[in-house]
Image (cartoon, rainbow, N blue to C red):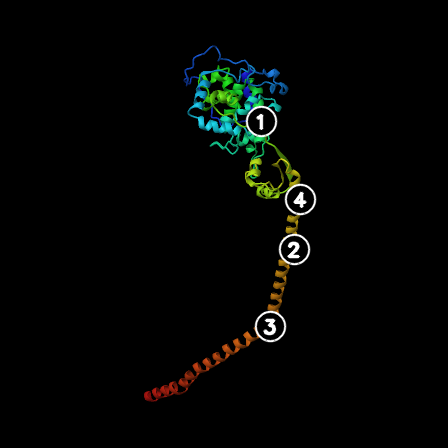
Amino acid sequence: MRWKNLAIVAAAMGASGLTGCAAKQQHTAPNPYSWAQRDGQWGALRPLYPPSQADTANLGRRHAGAGDEAFNFQHPRVDDFLAQFQTRWRDSFSVALSRSGRYVPRMSSILEKEGVPPELVYLPLIESGFKISARSPAGAVGPWQFIPGTGRRYGLRIDRYVDERRDPIKSTRAAARYLRDLYGMFGDWHLALAGYNTGENRISGILSRSDAEDFWQMSERGYLCRETSDYVPKFLAALQIAERPEDFEFDRPVEELMAYDVVEVDRSVSLSTVANLIDSSTEEIKELNPALHQGVTPPDGYQIRLPKGAKQGFEVAFAAYGDELEARAAAERERAMLEVQERAVRSHRTVARNRSSRPVIAAKRGGSASRSVRIPTKAIAAKRSAPTARAAATNRAPIVVARTKGRR
């Protein structure tokens, strides 16, 4: 009954998911893997945090290496991905791991504040490789690979000017809340991770319609697509390497503290202008503000990040810049007004000149027209009528008389 109720809860949350694929619906699907139980360490999981005790004050207190069954889980599929990360995918994983050092300290603190295990900070290793601008063919964006619908549902702004899925701080907060909600639904972190990949509706539907009770049973019995079936063991393998990189002959990433100042701007301004106002580089400002994907703040204003210690100098420079913009705008308005007035004066003069010259032109045109039309018309009429009159007077009358005399 508990799993059937999850379908109702998932429907209330709305259709979601990130970059995962649809789960298989047929219950008789063949098993894609032939796993063997090893040391009794895999099977149905005891929930790490039972739903009745999953309050946010306690969720973030657990840490890896403290007997956490969900994240220190042993399974042949996990071992398979450990081998892949050390051989076939070693170069790309090493780059992603080194890139994580810039984001992990701040992200893990956000996860703990939001009440989810900090181990989940390494989920972007398999989602995006900690690449802020990552985009999937399905339209998922950012380090946590949110699709637009789920991103907006968890408070991320996505529009023409801003895409906060790219923001490592705001997207981490949204991902933490989504993961916390998923755990609240399923009471199991493996199922929560599967839901994060393929959508909570699909996982709750499988639980309500099948005999599977945990992620591993779903995967073993063919209820999940290949991507989602691989998702959880891939993350567990990546987590083991990220927590102990030296044990797997990887370099430990150098952790960096994301230190910055936040300032509000009330107008549209390019990030290159921001950089010039504080003698910084445009690349540095863009790196601090990846959500501004057009390189400009929205017209309605936005909070931007500046290098630590640059806030006060920017506020002074930006105020002067605003005054300069206002002065330029006032000068432009005055220039435009003068142009309008000049055009009006020129138009008035042209109209007045045309009106004053119309009688003279009309008189000249009228006189010439009368002479050129009337004189030739009378002359032609006279010439045409003269022969007719002569012919009538001389020719026709004698002929008639002669004929008459002959008959007599």
Residue in front for this viewpoint, 20 or 144: 144
Percent position of residue 304, x then y: 61, 37
User: Above or below — where is 352 with respect to 161?
Assistant: below
Percent position of residue 15, x then y: 53, 27
**Cα separation between marks 3 and 2:** 40 Å
Percent position of residue 166, x then y: 55, 33
**Cα separation between marks 1 and 2:** 54 Å
Residue in front for this viewpoint, 105 or 26: 105
Which residue is denoted by mark 3 in the rendering? 359
Q: In front of the other: label 2 or label 4? A: 4
Residue in front for this viewpoint, 255 or 238: 255
Question: What is the total number of numbered labels drawn onto the structure image?
Answer: 4
**Cα separation between marks 2 and 4:** 22 Å
Splitting the image into 4 quarters, where does residue 177 fall?
top right
**Cα separation between marks 1 and 3:** 89 Å
Amino acid tagged 4: Ala
Mark toward the start of the polypeptide (4 vs 3): 4
User: Above or below — where is 312 with respect to 99?
Assistant: below
Amino acid tagged 3: Pro
SS class, disc 3: helix
Which residue is denoted by mark 4 in the rendering? 319
Q: Residue furthest left?
A: 406
Mark toward the start of the polypeptide (3 vs 2): 2
Q: Residues within 10 Å of mark 1 (few under 14, many from 20)?
A: some
Mark toward the start of the polypeptide (1 vs 3): 1
